Amino acid sequence: MKKAPDPVDRHVGHRVRVRRLLIGVSQERLGDALGVTFQQIQKYEKGANRISASRLRQISEMLGVPVSFFYEGAPRQDGARGDETGAEPTGDALAQDVLWTSQDLQLVRAFQRIGDNQVRRRIISLVEAIGTGGASPDDAP
């Protein structure tokens, strides 16, 4: 019987995938930079193959994040989620742990291209209002 991937390996792989997609790097391009096949990148991202410490450092440099990024919100041995200090996860850590869809990534990429901070804040307010079933910001008195 085949053993299921370790939850931490799956979490780290998922974070690699999310970051890779957010910055628009293909599995093939990341694999070429690391000297591995895109199939190996797929296995890393699914948690099927563990990523060594040196390889994770290479990935972090290629994707422009610190190694610690991949462990943020990772499950602990006791099954809880949090950081290495044992602190409870923050809202940001929980938000980063979602299973991202192509629509989520499309929205984030488009949002990142908006240069006007006031427009960005209004979009956030609008999306929050829609998400809670409330009125849009334009409905405010």
Image (cartoon, helix red, strand yellow):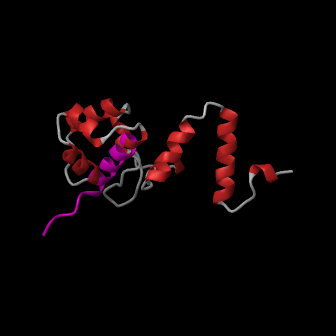
Q: Quadrant of residue 66?
A: top left
Residue furthest toward the left? 1
Residue furthest toward the bottom? 1
Quarter of the picture holding the N terminus: bottom left
- Is residue 12 inside the magenta stretch? yes
- Is residue 45 inside the magenta stretch? no
How many marks are shown on the rendered structure? 0
From the top left corner, tell me how far across and down residue 133 is, in percent.
69, 62
Q: Nearer the viewer, residue 63 or 54?
A: 63
Residue at horizontal 43 percent and vertical 41 percent from the top: 22
Q: Nearer the viewer, residue 54 or 23?
A: 23
The vertical placement of 123 against 3, above or below, is above
Q: Nearer the viewer, residue 1 or 78?
A: 1
Q: Quadrant of residue 81?
A: bottom left
From the top left corner, tell me how far across and down residue 53 is, in percent.
22, 38
Residue at horizontal 55 percent and vertical 34 percent from the top: 113
| Left or right of residue 122, residue 115 in this image | left
Residue at horizontal 47 percent and vertical 47 percent from the top: 105
| Left or right of residue 92, residue 51 in this image | left
Give the prevailing secondary structure in the magenta stretch. Answer: helix
Magenta extent:
1-20
The answer to whether one can see residue 89 in this image is: no
From the top left corner, tell me how far across and down residue 26 is, in percent.
32, 40
Residue at horizontal 22 percent and vertical 44 percent from the top: 38
The answer to whether one can see residue 7 in this image is: yes
The vertical placement of 62 against 6, above or below, is above
| Left or right of residue 90, residue 77 in this image | left
From the top left corner, tell me how far across and down residue 106 is, in percent.
49, 46
Residue furthest toward the right? 141
